[in-house]
Amino acid sequence: MRALKLISLLLCCALLCACGSAAAPQPYESYVYAMDTVMTLRVWSADAAGAQSALSAVSGMLSALDEQLAVTGEKSEIAALNAGGHRSVTLSAESAEILSRMLAVSRDTGGVLDPSIYPVVRAWGFTTDSYRIPDEAELREILKKVDYTKIALEGNTVTLEPGMQIDLGSVVKGYAGDRAAALLREAGVASAVLNLGGNVRLVGSRPDGAPFRVGVQDPLDESSYLGIVAAADKSVVTSGGYNRYFEQDGRTYWHIIDPRTGCPADSGVISATVIGDDGLRCDALSTACFILGVEDAFAYWREKGGFDLILITADGHIYITPDLADSFRLEDAYADDYTVEVHE
Amino acid sequence: MMKYLRSTRFWLGAFSVLLLLSAASIVFMHRRADGGTAVILQNNREIRRIDLSAVQEPYTLRVDNPEGGYNIVLVEKGRISVTEASCPDKICIHQGRISDSTKPIVCLPNRLMILIEAASGSAPDADALTS
Amino acid sequence: METKRLTRLALFTTVALIIFTVEAQIPVPVPLPGVKLGLANVVTVYAAFTMTGPDAVLILLVRILLGSLLTGNMMALLYSLGGGGLCIAVTLALAKLLRRDQMWIASVAGAVAHNVGQLMVAAAVMQTMAVFAYLPALLISGVVTGAFTGLAAQVLTRRLDKN
């Protein structure tokens, strides 16, 4: 009798323990290859099946979005638009919305972010890996077709001028992150970290309540990060020329082109990180700020606000917005090479 | 010198030493701690980096050789292997799973190499890297 | 070329080729690239000890070329030439120094050289030294298979000498 009681007591304890640990969320990870890059999805959930189905939903959404918005591809709306000469093309509501929001940032930043920069990027060879330096005459010709104000968007219908080609690549991952976060929240996921090819989207905080720690890659060493920013439920997006560039005759040419010159951006900024709630906007602004340079980027921030900035310059400075003073920390190894300054 | 080269004993000794050293280095290499980051290289260009310790559900990746041919890579928790390949010998498949930095998986015809990086404390504190 | 020599060359090349293609059909249990019994080397070693250098090289070269064609593995040609080249160089050098009853030594050295040669080709093709991680295993494999084929070559030689 006694033995039986003891056994049942132990069994109950074991059961309780099992219940206890089952309630603690476990991490589940999945990888997707989309938008020309590897995307890492990590969610925490107490329910394995739920987590897997949420991850599948996000993977599926990312692949579909990629097909829809990539600049090439038979199912791509953008490719169809670019190939259509200057016929008016009606996009899906979603694509139209993305274009519209991207154009809003173009207007705000004086055209420094321009969806129609694509022909110039192509001329430099960044779309095919056969890099070259176009001459001034060629650039002048091509730049005539670069003008976001000539992209006519009415409702969902877009009309481009002849020879114009657009690419939503600078905002697509940011947008995708937002959609993924929405899908995950709907599925009941409270903590997640999504890394869409360098574009980080956070859902909530870590399971233990602490903010996530996002490393900012060292522009000069891809295997290392030079600082950590603590954030929760935000988009953290970085634009860096170091992601795609070529060298010729001792000079470096990267893929982030300044529409005002037709040449790689040369503002002194080597890495621009934008943190905010709106992933599309963060993605767009990271490119814009990279091109604008420190003064103009912070001027824009003062005027519009609603996001935080980390700008790393070639001369060893890291400029951050005041709200990041407590949440951004430079790694000790980099203390000698960089000075962090709060820029008002 | 020539005298040694003609002596059977010399060669016996030389081969024995070779065998011993090789065996010893194999044992030594396996002792190295595994870091868990697999790096996949196609034609010596890094095309993917995977943190094997964070993998929950096994999944497969297809790597295409631009000159024709392909390999299917199976990624599991702590291990990686090639499960299907277009090469004639299928040696890459027979090499099985690797889980540490001792040896890479190599598919010579498809110019594929998969290696695991030794642990170097890469991003131990960060949840993600923005780049 | 005199008929006797031509016939001899053709005969040994054919034998080596047959051994090579038959062995190619047998799967190797060891999952390492470049590991194989290399039985055709019995002919190579025997030729190195009983014929002139150029003749031995000729047999090997023709066997490698036709072997790649017959097994449908042209990819392997580069590796076979690299490995075979180093192998025959070492084997011939030792054949000049050693006695016939020391043939197995040349065989082991040749097998090891063969594997090293193949690794060198792999390193050049893949543009990396990482493939040398296989060196210890391939060295052991070379010694073992070389000893085996060397023994076979010794026995073969003894029988042939008797006749």
Image: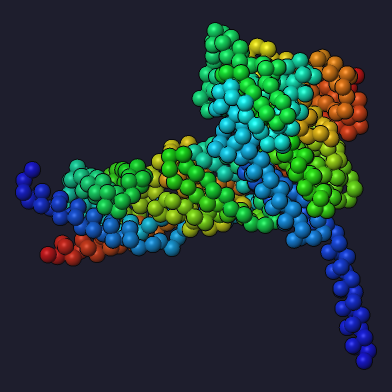
Position of the C terminus of chain A, as image quadrant, is top right
Toward the top, the furthest residue is A137
Image coords of residue A196 (percent x, y)? 70, 39
Asked if residue C123 is positioned above or below residue B96 in the image, the reply reads above
Image coords of residue A267 (percent x, y)? 73, 15
Q: Which of B101 and B26 is in front in this view?
A: B101
Residue B85 horizontal side relative to residue B1, left or right: right
At horizontal 90% and vertical 88% (from top left) the residue drawn is A3
Residue C102 horizontal side relative to residue B15, left or right: left
Image quadrant assignment for residue A13: bottom right
Asked if residue C77 is positioned above or below residue A246 in the image, the reply reads below
Image coords of residue A281 (percent x, y)? 78, 29
At horizontal 59% and vertical 24% (from top left) the residue drawn is A87
Q: Can residue C13 be seen in this view?
A: yes
Total number of numbered labels? Answer: 0
Position of the N terminus of chain A, as image quadrant, is bottom right
At horizontal 30% and vertical 53% (from top left) the residue drawn is C71
At horizontal 85% and vertical 59% (from top left) the residue drawn is A24
Residue B56 horizontal side relative to residue A22, left or right: left
Q: Nearer the viewer, residue A166 or B34?
A: A166
Q: Can residue B20 be seen in this view?
A: no
Image coords of residue A179 (percent x, y)? 76, 42
Asked if residue A225 is positioned above or below residue A207 in the image, the reply reads above
Image quadrant assignment for residue A318: top right
